[in-house]
Image (cartoon, rainbow, N blue to C red):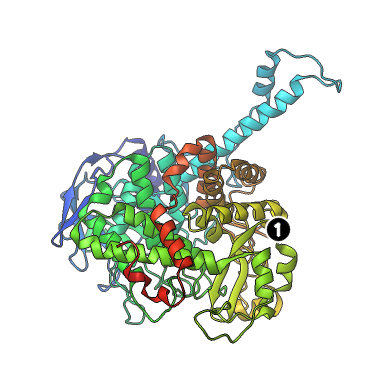
Amino acid sequence: MATLEAVRQVLSGALPRFGCFDLSFSKVNGLISVQSGVNNTRKSSVCAQVHKHSRISQDRRRICAFQARNGVFQGKNDVSRLNSMSCKCQKAESLTGATAKDQHRDLLVDNSDKATSIPPNGITSPGINEFEVDQQLKHEKGGFGSNGKPATAGKHKDFTQKVRTNSIEDEAWKLLKNSMVYYCNNPIGTIAANNPSSTSTLNYDQVFIRDFIPSGIAFLLKGEYDIVRNFILHTLQLQSWEKTMDCYSPGQGLMPASFKVRTVPLDGDDFATEDVLDPDFGEAAIGRVAPVDSGLWWIILLRAYGKCSGDLSVQERVDVQTGIKMILKLCLADGFDMFPTLLVTDGSCMIDRRMGIHGHPLEIQALFYSALLCAREMLAPEDASADLKQALNNRLVALSFHIREYYWIDMRKLNEIYRYKTEEYSYDAVNKFNIYPDQIPSWLVGFMPSTGGYLIGNLQPAHMDFRFFSLGNLWSIVSSLATLDQSHAILDLIEAKWDELVADMPFKICYPALEGQEWQIITGSDPKNTPWSYHNGGSWPTLLWQLTVACIKLNRPEIAAKAVGLAEKRISLDNWPEYYDTKRARFIGKQAQLFQTWSAAGYLVAKLLLANPSAAKNLVNEEDSELVNAFSCMISSSPRRKRGWKKQILV
């Protein structure tokens, strides 16, 4: 109790708190300089948690900022990369006695530095005062309608609904703020979930790059830029560390899947602590799969930061430019693959478990295309980037042609596949990937509407994955990977198949689910990915924000507004679940985390964009006229001449 009281006094300002310089890195000739600015922001309890952990072995690359006895924070790095990183702090009291119960309570401290009272079920009151609503409506002119009921009844209902909606937004913001993680007193990200009643956190107490994207965009749209800037710069410092899995190092430029902020006692000094950024590149993940999408999302968020804040100095920094180039070189590296799409393994994206998406999944291709466009826009005009930009332009043209031509399916294309000839050998072959018509699944015949279409989930030799994957299709609209006609057709299909893709809670991650023997073979009988659960056809509220950006881009916001309205009926009452189960999304996911940060963030981004649609322009990629012209040239050229297109396009 004494320790808890000390924590409360620190948070309220009664006792000295950490005061830390804002770390700002810039790499020149391998050196990292530090720019500083005093920041007395309250430190999150996630960063303040102190455990008596054993020290991580020396081969683990970590970024540390530790407080010595003299009150000075000093940088520490196991491979001496950040030896120059330091920041001056006030001396703080030892918090090593904090209990798990105390820490959970601290997680629910809002920005006013006042502890938030949490009821036993973990839900805060929505704050709707029906008496106040009635009193306000009494002042309005009344009367009776044609149905004999007071005219104020409709106003009462509308006003109550508006108040309830505002309370849901306030609750979402509170959840988002309480999930913030601090490093050296500076906000650096948001943890994946913040359920005060759960003791089984797994890795949901970490900051995931993928999960932070909607949180970061919500902060950007709200005008809170510091946390996004800090996130971009600190995750950059974690890039390309030589993390190992059974003595093998992944390619240089890889971004981590997640990282954890730890505050631990300093060796040999009971009165000093150190802040540690401990990244996970997949070597600790379930399945040990490295994330392909982390670096792509990082580039997309970097561009969004510059667009929203107007601060282009971050993307112009030497270390940031180097980080962009390293990601591009990793993705653009030549290999054995014949296709312009990015070859990846199962579990390397949002669907992070075995779901049969190995090869060339649509989601990665859409993010890859978007990241290439964002990078081309941000790369500094210098001679060293000329070759990289040329390779980037060539890949953009080839990738857009490949996806638009071979991944697209509608009723016309389905009829064409149904009549495919197989075993064709020639440059003029129609069935280039030797797809067998018997692969067309029975569910697709009833699912495909007469108007509308979508991009299939995957394409490989003799294999088409006809499943509808939501993120890949929505981001193909946002990034202009799909043509304008294809983009509208995707939204047409969503409207036509609303009951299948949305039902009672937006939005199905994929459709349909794998069932029976197919589920056993493809997922390995994954008990978490049972039919219509988790990544196997589950419904994910976080997808609301991608849907909203896509709808606003095509000037069809009513589709997104309808989906948001559905979510508002349940998502707060259900404690902001990670995902929903069953075909109609009627059940909270059987293993879903509650108070999931990106569920709240996705909802907030959707609401912010619907209230201010013009802000969506900072998130979308408009179609490039040069790419359109090059794309037309590829279609019109003969198959034999296509082999020399690289030398002639966009030189």
Secondary structure type for disc 1 = helix
Q: Residue at x 77, y 19 (%)?
A: 151
Question: Which quarter of the picture shows residue 374?
Answer: bottom left
- Per the image, the residue denoted by label 1 is 500
Asked if one can make out residue 598 in the rendered structure from this viewpoint, the answer is yes
Query: In terms of depth relative to the viewer, which is nearer, 165 or 330?
Result: 330
Q: Position of residue 309 (x, y in %)?
A: 34, 40
Locate the C terminus by quadrant: bottom left
Query: In terms of depth relative to the viewer, which is nearer, 18 or 552?
Result: 552
| Three-letter code, disc 1 | Glu
Query: In terms of depth relative to the viewer, which is nearer, 52 or 422?
Result: 422
Q: Residue at x 71, y 25 (%)?
A: 156
Seen in the image, is 410 located left or right of residue 248? right
Q: Position of residue 537 (x, y in %)?
A: 64, 64
Total marks shown come to: 1
Q: Position of residue 444 (x, y in %)?
A: 70, 68
Seen in the image, is 78 located left or right of residue 340? left
Q: Position of residue 228 (x, y in %)?
A: 36, 47
Q: Residue at x 75, y 14 (%)?
A: 142
Q: Residues within 10 Å of mark 1 (few under 14, many from 20)?
A: some
Question: Which quarter of the picture shows residue 57?
Answer: bottom left
